[in-house]
Amino acid sequence: MAVAPPSTEDQSKILEDALAVVKVQSFQMKRCLDNNKLMDGLKHCSTMLSELRTSSLTPKNYYELYMAIFDALRHVSIYLKEAHQSGRHHLADLYELV
């Protein structure tokens, strides 16, 4: 038997909750990266990405969640590029850590 998809109200609640987690984790991630706490920043990044592990959202709502996370990840990308170019962190070393 197939399970009925969540109602529109449930969809909105699930998306709202996920976006709230993304907002908090994104803020924490940025704060850690601004203070050069890379591993803590990556931990918040991982928590944020775990919100994508859902099958409860419709494709439209999932895409909205995906785009919110994708936008937040730009900060990580910029940080890693600048850290590598300045010599603070070498990408090969970070690759081996993760």
Image: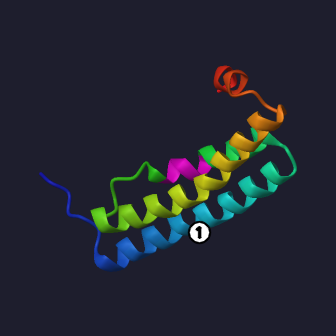
Q: Which residues are magenta?
A: 47-51
User: Is residue 66 shown above or below 40?
Assistant: below
At x 67%, y 64%, the residue is 24
Q: Could you say which quadrant of the image residue 89 lies in?
A: top right
Report x, y in % for residue 42.
69, 42
Report x, y in % for residue 97.
69, 23
User: Is residue 28 shown above or below 91?
Assistant: below
- Front position in the image: 90 or 45: 90
Relative side of 60 to 51, left or right? left
Q: Could you say which quadrant of the image residue 21 lies in?
A: bottom right
Relative side of 5 to 85, left or right? left
Quarter occupied by the C terminus: top right
Name the residue at the bottom extreme.
9
At x 60%, y 44%, the residue is 46
At x 34%, y 62%, the residue is 57
Q: Secondary structure at mark 1?
A: helix
The coloring applied to the image is: rainbow
Residue hosting label 1: 20
Q: In the image, is residue 50 part of the stretch drawn in magenta?
A: yes
- Front position in the image: 78 or 21: 78
Name the residue at the front extreme.
85
At x 81%, y 51%, the residue is 32
Q: In the image, is residue 83 part of the stretch drawn in magenta?
A: no
Q: How many numbered badges does the structure rendering display?
A: 1
Report x, y in % for residue 86.
82, 37
Assign the magenta stretch its main secondary structure.
helix
Mark 1 is surrounded, within 10 Å at the Cα level, by few (under 14), some (14 to 19) or many (20 or more) other residues, namely few
Residue type for callout 1:
Ala
Report x, y in % for residue 70.
51, 56
- Front position in the image: 77 or 13: 77
Name the residue at the left extreme.
1
